[in-house]
Image (tube, grey):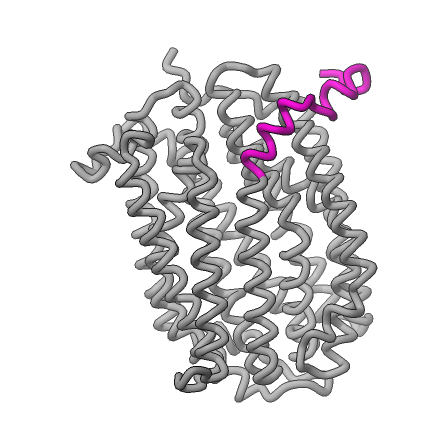
Amino acid sequence: MKISKNLRRYMLGDKAFYKMLMAIAVPVILQNGLTNLVSLLDNIMVGAVGTEQMTGVSIVNQLLFVFNLCIFGGLGGAGIFTAQFYGKQDHEGVRSTFRFKMMLVLVLFVLAMAVFTTAGGRLIELYLHEGGETGDIAATAQYGADYLRMMLWGLLPFAIMQVYASTLRETGETLLPMKAGMVAILVNLVFNYILIFGHFGAPAMGVEGAALATVLSRWVECFIVVRWTHVHADEKPFILGAYRSMHVPKALTLDIFRRGMPLLVNEALWSAGMAILTQSFSTRGLAVVAGINISSTISNLFNVVWMAMGTAVSIIVGQHLGANEFEKAKESCWRILTFGVAGAVVMGAIMYAFAPLFPLLYNTTDEVRRIAAGVIRIVALAAPMHAFNHSSYFTLRSGGKTWITFLFDSAYLWVISIPLTRLLAVGTAWPVLVVYFITQFIDLIKVALGAYLIRKGVWINNIVDQK
């Protein structure tokens, strides 16, 4: 397609398109926004107890991030089929993908428990290095171990809830997961206040209180989503007989593995790669870990607009592809991408302007605040670039081109980003903010690659057509 001749058509949608986009994106934006807001408040409350506590929690959350993204990656592979099956109103196909998702997350849960219970302490220690003026390494390690031990109780409800919530979203129900998430957020916030500091007669549990509040909120969210789905089986017929057996047709199972496993491997490698990037920066001292943690918490709150565009691409473009509406899929892809980048420009400008103020919310050292403010500004400048790459990834994924997304995402990370970061962070004495800037903007290469692949149309594919 020649974008230059159809600029308005492909970049800007009509009122009906944006109404459809907002119907999908706004619930996701609100849910993720509220989740990240509570994460920010949680971070601030833990930080009020001490910098070591905040750093220990951030290290564990980096490790748990690997498990979370393995869940998302595994579900995403099957979700490609769910969206396209729903696009052609094949409820039995949706039911089969639901069963596949459930079995997969249970396997991932068992593996994660085995890793974290046997090697959790050693993984935390990888992030603990002398350097700068901030932090007690032994105390940080102990706080991290305490937090991890409690957080393990929340892995199972998180995994099960994601199976239900992802299937609901892929079949057009975005409001219920948002509502359940809002209730969970409220539970998390209230119990954070009570359990971290010991209000209303409760013991002051510190980081363990923060973990327990998160675990309680995950069980509540899981209960709400699961119960609603089964009560509303007439609206969501895929759940009827979903547990009568766990049979998934062999051909579909092989096809999901063929197209979906690259996504799982991609998310596992990508999240592990991000953990390695953080570990590389941790060699510069605990102050850098704390500063990056503050920046990540703030930027996650501001990035919810363009992050939600990934969900919108998966649903809208996926359903167009499943219905063989290829021209509509192309139009929707570029319109969503344009909207996401524009949102990133606006939110990035706000984040850049207020960067020095955000670290003042934390009870930490001036060294940590200085690093955090600098990292926030770098992330703000890079936001439009990351928004483009995010939507590009989900566009390629929507058509089942999972090996291409693997090369585009995690292969790029491991071949280019990780060696470069390791070289600069460990092998040079350059200021950490200079190193961080370089490692962020190396992703401009991905922008060029993503634009080429989308324009070439390699992702335009109906993977559930029975012909």
Q: Is residue 404 something that shows in the picture?
A: no
Identify the residue at horizontal 51%, vertical 66% (top origin): 61
Boundaries of the magenta span:
1-25
Q: Is residue 21 above or below residue 226?
A: above
* Residue 12 highlighted magenta (yes or no): yes
Q: Is residue 407 above or below residue 135?
A: above
Looking at the rendered image, the quarter that the C terminus falls into is top left
- Secondary structure that dominates the magenta span: helix
| Name of the residue lying farthest toward the left | 244
Identify the residue at horizontal 43%, vertical 80% (top origin): 146
Q: Is residue 211 above or below residue 413?
A: below
Q: Quadrant of residue 153?
A: bottom left
Looking at the rendered image, the quarter that the N terminus falls into is top right
Return the x and y of residue 423 as percentages of the image width and height: 72, 64
Identify the residue at horizontal 50%, vertical 59% (top origin): 65
* Residue 407 highlighted magenta (yes or no): no
